[in-house]
Amino acid sequence: MSIQQYHFHIRKEALKFASAHMTVFPDGSKESLHGHNYSTEVSLELSSIALNDTIAFSVVKKIMREICEAWDEKVLLPSQCPFFELLKEDEQAVEFSLCKKRYVLPADEVVFLALDNITSETLAGEFSRRLILGLKKLPEFSLIQSVSVRVEESPGQGGTCVWRSKK
């Protein structure tokens, strides 16, 4: 008897976000502040595609859209980076140092991510973590064998994170 695997894929033009970031390097240097129009793609490996086990595309797209909206038109900052220091934060502004450079940005345009760097692969990991939190609310979650999230900063260039069930 053969084992069948089923994959469920979503990549839609609307499921994207435009964000600014600065990649940090191990020597304490970094890129200049710049942005990308990131695209996202999700693939779920399912153990069953029976009628009673169906997961609607719309449910997964809703979770993806919420993550994209939270990061869209924001500056993404790595709060766990050893070269990052939060100097001051209030309702109006965020003042921080990254790789010994000081920045002040409007508070409503900044998103702190509990990451040590902001790269396509770390964003794929964080996107995956948030997606799985949303998927765990589904009764069909136990049917998901793996989740693959790809975040591209430009066509053909990006990072992927794969989560596998411990079953």
Image (cartoon, grey):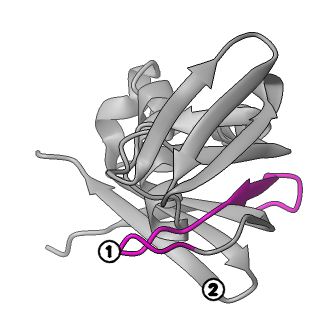
- Residue drawn where x is 45% and y is 39% of the image: 85
Check the image and report above or below for 78 versus 3. Answer: above
Which type of secondary structure does the marked residue at label 1 adopt? loop
- Say what amino acid the circle numbered 1 marks: Pro
Q: Residue 157 carries which label?
A: 2
Neighbour class for label 2 at 10 Å: few (<14), some, many (≥20)?
few
Find residue 66 and report its horizontal and vertical position in percent.
72, 31
Find residue 114 and report its horizontal and vertical position in percent.
41, 37
Find residue 33 and report its horizontal and vertical position in percent.
73, 64
Check the image and report above or below for 11 versus 107. Answer: below
Q: Please name the residue that numbered disc 1 is placed on.
A: 26
CA–CA distance between discs 1 and 2?
Answer: 21 Å
Give the camera-side residue of 42 and 39. 39
Q: Which residues are drawn in magenta?
A: 11-30
In this rendering, does residue 54 appear at all? Answer: no
- Say what amino acid the circle numbered 2 marks: Gln
- Residue drawn where x is 40% and y is 63% of the image: 161
In terms of sequence position, does the residue under pointer 1 or pointer 2 come before the other? 1
Magenta-span inclusion, residue 29: yes
From the viewer's perspective, tell me whether residue 123 is left or right of residue 148.
right
Which type of secondary structure does the marked residue at label 2 adopt? strand
